[in-house]
Image (cartoon, helix red, strand yellow):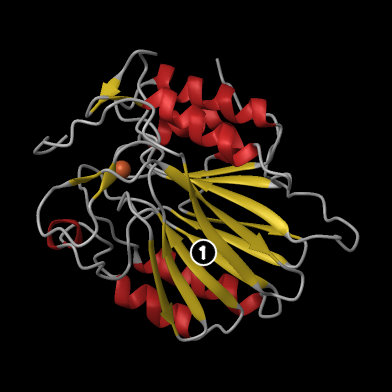
Amino acid sequence: MQHAVASQPDPGIPETQSPPRPLRLIQLTDSHLFADAAGRLLGLNTRRTFESVLALALDGDTPADAVVMTGDLVQDETAEGYAYLARELEATGLPCFCIPGNHDRRALMEQWLGAAAMGPVADNRIDGWHLIFLDSTLPGEDGGRLTARQVHHLDTLLERDPDRHCLIFLHQHPVPIGSAWLDTMGLANGAQLLAVCDRHPQLKSLIFGHIHQAFAQHQGHYQILGTPSTCFQFRPGSQGFALDDRPPGYRELCLHPDGQLTTRVVRLPAYPEPLSLDASGY
Ligand SMILES: [Fe+2]
């Protein structure tokens, strides 16, 4: 049975009249969920950490306007895992946009998340902002790459809408993050993506998951942003696989009508249960 998230992002979020506050987008990433509600990865029940982070994101004084999930949604790539995620997202009552990561199965995403499954290149307009979603995954590979057709499509979308402030979301990191083992599995043609981004001044940020840690870098007129996972974290700067004891979290993106972007990473106060810090892989 097809099970779509209630608030469909297509044909678009209704445009509001002169919003009195910035739009508040919540980015959740790398949830690594399982079919089994008791499923664990590196000591963590990933459904529990996901639910804790989602609750934290929705609990603020300012309501959220939309949720973006940037891949590695379901670790065991099962229908039950996506069905669970669809129920959780539906319960938020918010428009949701999901792109795949290297731990995902696109056909199952489309089946269970419906129009919330975005890509290979998809976009949505919300007030004065343009959100673009790229599927950067390669079957069977941890690293990613955009096809020439995707790069061209992105360039065309940006060229046709030069006055709308823009955010681009993808899974793999398009620039090195200073962690040798993760930098072998980034976006292989990141330079090509950045060359397109550099040409379009309305772009405010390029935002990704995959690295399980916070990252921020300025690139000309836009920011390049990475976001902690909702479950385990990788240690920044580590040359080999290493876990980090900073707790799970999410990224808040506040989109102001004048094109200003303000953002922050928000974390749980602690891991909800002990992380297997001495693990050598997952
Ligand atoms: Fe991941």
Picture quadrant where residue 261 is located: bottom right
Task: Give percent across and percent down for residue 12.
Answer: 73, 50
Q: Residue furthest front?
A: 269
* 201 to 85, vertically: above or below: below
Does residue 256 appear in the picture of this structure?
yes
**10 Å crowding of disc 1: few (<14), some (14-19), many (20+):** some
In-image side of 80 versus 140 (left or right): right
Q: Residue at x 56, y 20 (%)?
A: 2
Please name the residue that numbered disc 1 is placed on: 168
Q: Residue at x 57, y 37 (%)?
A: 56
- Please name whichever residue, 150 or 194, is drawn nearer the observer in this view of the structure: 194
Task: Give percent across and percent down for residue 47.
Answer: 42, 24
- Looking at the image, in which quadrant does ligand 1 appear? top left
Quadrant (top left/top right/bottom left/bottom right) for the N terminus: top right
Quadrant (top left/top right/bottom left/bottom right) for the C terminus: top left
Amino acid at circle 1? Ile
* 273 to 231, vertically: above or below: above
Q: Residue at x 61, y 79 (%)?
A: 202
Q: Residue at x 72, y 57 (%)?
A: 23
Task: Give percent across and percent down for residue 28.
Answer: 49, 44
In-image side of 176 versus 248 (left or right): left
Q: Residue furthest right?
A: 17
Does residue 111 appear in the picture of this structure?
no
Q: Secondary structure at mark 1?
A: strand
* 14 to 54, vertically: above or below: below
Picture quadrant where residue 90 is located: top right
* 66 to 123, vertically: above or below: above
